[in-house]
Amino acid sequence: MDCPVCLSLRCKSTIFCLLQMLRDRFKEFARDTESIGQERVAAVNEVCDRLIGSGHSDAAVIAEWKDTINELWADLLEMIDTRTQMLAASYELFKFYNDCKELLERIRVRLFCCCCLN
């Protein structure tokens, strides 16, 4: 059976690993979404431009839809960027708290050892 200190360290390590994994997977998701999405938005814009250029009877509606798609794409990219920043901040905050706890534990061990020697 593991002692509470070992369990505590394993738990911190597991949380830290999960946070790293979440951050890495989101980076991959963001990269894939941005590259594939950019291709698709560009393709839609090209089709819209051709339809509008050819004098389509619904050119005004097509232009509105094109603008809407471009606005939604920009919103999605902004949300991805915001989420990336939030994950990075969470990672740094957890790392800071974890480092502080480890340092405090080292100080306690040294104080305990010094007290035992006296």
Image: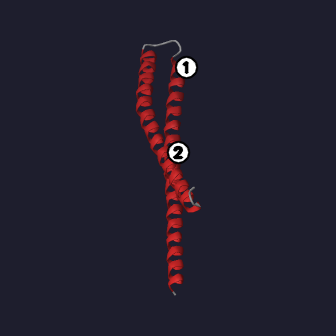
**Residue that badge 1 annotates:** 61
Number of residues whose C-alpha sits closer than 10 Å to that of mark 2, classed few (under 14), some (14–19) or many (20 or more)? some
Whichever of labels 2 and 1 marks the residue nearer the N terminus, that label is 1
**Residue that badge 2 annotates:** 83
**Residue 13 position within the rendered picture, expressed as x and y whole percent measured from the top left:** 50, 54
Task: Identify the element where label 1 is drawn.
Answer: helix
Towards the viewer: 113 or 72 = 113
Q: CA distance from mark 2 to mark 1?
A: 33 Å
Number of residues whose C-alpha sits closer than 10 Å to that of mark 1, classed few (under 14), some (14–19) or many (20 or more)? few
**Residue 114 position within the rendered picture, expressed as x and y whole percent measured from the top left:** 50, 82
Tell me the quarter of the image containing the N terminus: bottom right
Q: Quadrant of residue 47?
A: top left
| Residue that protrudes farthest toward the right in the picture | 4
Q: Quadrant of residue 3?
A: bottom right
Which residue is found at the position 54% from the left and 74% from the top?
108
Q: Residue 17 has which mark?
A: none
Which residue is found at the position 53% from the left and 82% from the top?
116
Is residue 67 placed above or below 10 in the rendered structure?
A: above
Number of numbered tags placed on the structure image: 2
**Residue 111 position within the rendered picture, expressed as x and y whole percent measured from the top left:** 52, 79
Q: Are marks 2 and 1 in contact (CB under 8 Å)?
A: no
For the residue marked with disc 1, what is the amino acid?
Answer: Val
**Residue 91 position within the rendered picture, expressed as x and y whole percent measured from the top left:** 50, 53
| Residue that protrudes farthest toward the bottom in the picture | 118
Which residue is found at the position 53% from the left and 32% from the top?
72
For the residue marked with disc 2, what is the amino acid?
Answer: Arg
Is residue 14 placed above or below 76 in the rendered structure?
A: below
What colour scheme has been applied to the protein in the rendered image? Answer: secondary structure
Task: Identify the element where label 2 is drawn.
Answer: helix
